[in-house]
Amino acid sequence: MSIPITAEDFSAIGERFQSEDIIDEIDRLLPLATADIPQLATRGYGPTELTKLTVLRSTLIAEVASRNQQRGSKKGSRQVEAHAIKEGKLVLRSGEAMALATLTNRTPASGETALQTQQLVTDTLEQIEALGGNIGHDSAKIRTRLTSLVSILTLPALAVDPSDAPARAEFVAKVQAAIAALPQLAEQKKTHQQDAKTGTSSLDELDGRTYTNLKTMTRVGRTYWNEHGNRQRAGEYQLNALNDRAGKPAAPKAGGEGEAEPKAEAKPEAAGKPEAAGEAAGKKKAP
């Protein structure tokens, strides 16, 4: 048996349970413990501990709501950045086609030799072809390609007639706007991811503290009523929703004694200790 002391201790316990399951158990056990608090207080779980539990419950509900909001923000940031990357790819391919068309339709300058024209076209074509290749969902990669595109479109070899200059300038401005937007979107996504990670850690600790309070209450209640011969009442002090993570209904014995302490390294005890299976089962919280 071990007693959690540090925030890390409580987090290690809390990360193995879903917050919603803990709240469900509080809702089930709170009326029972409230009615029995005079008796429980004689064995170490009194009004102060019960008040702490109600406060923990309120805080837990608020934190769960905050976590869900953070998840929504993180998902939204991913979607916005993904859309920006997609739009950037479309602009890149359009610019690539524009550059190729301009190069193909280019009229050699006066006095330019065939060898010079061939060298100029070859060099320019290599730069245009470098814009191709897989980009995936890499924000930095699409920004780099778009920046290269702007440079390519300013090459003398790809100069346009004055009549086409406004359209070229408008397109270059669109490319530059895409470049400017992507770093900000990437930073927003990172911020939301970090907030979600921090929120999960905080919620794990809160889950652990709340579970530990509940664990103490059920142990005290069960042993008190067993001591006084009321096995039916003792059997009500179980953590039913936290016993079996596989979804099977928990079937605690009336007046059952003994529960495995919440140690991360502990293995489930033998059948008949209804909380052992649940405590061993892990839970995963999505960041």
Image (cartoon, rainbow, N blue to C red):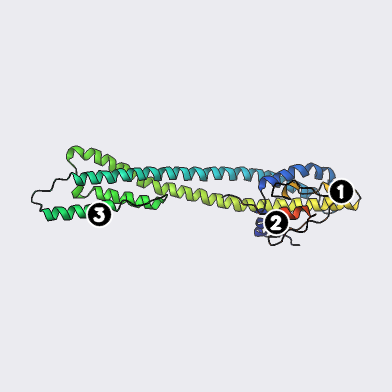
Residue 280 disc label: 2
Q: Residue at x 17, y 41 (%)?
A: 161
Mark 1: amino acid: Gln
User: Which one is earlier in the sequence, the residue at label 2 or at label 1?
Assistant: 1
Asked if residue 52 is positioned above or below residue 258 in the image, the reply reads above
Residue depth check, mark 2 versus mark 1: number of the one nearer the observer = 2
Task: Say which label, 3 or 1, has the lower sequence index.
Answer: 1
What is the count of numbered marks?
3
- For the residue carrying disc 1, how many other residues have a C-alpha within 10 Å: few (<14), some (14-19), or many (20+)? some
For numbered disc 3, what is the local secondary structure? helix
Question: Mark 2 and 3 residues: CB-CB less than 8 Å, in contact?
Answer: no
SS state under label 2: helix
The CA distance from mark 2 to mark 3 is 60 Å
Q: Residue at x 71, y 50 (%)?
A: 210
Residue 149 screen position, x and y as percent: 29, 49
Q: Would you say 160 lies left or right of 198 here?
A: left
Q: Which residue is mark 1?
A: 39
| Contact flag, marks 3 and 1 (Cβ < 8 Å) | no
Q: Position of residue 240 (x, y in %)?
A: 76, 47
Indicate which disc residue 64 carries. none
Residue 118 shows in this picture? yes
Query: Which quadrant of the figure has residue 270?
Result: bottom right
Task: Give the camera-side residue of 191 and 87.
Answer: 87
Spatial distance from mark 2 to mark 1, Cα to Cα?
31 Å
- Residue shown at 86% from the left, 50% from the top: 255
Q: Which mark is residue 126?
A: 3
Q: Amino acid at mark 3?
A: Glu
The image position of residue 180, as x and y in percent, is 36, 46
Amino acid type at circle 2 is Ala
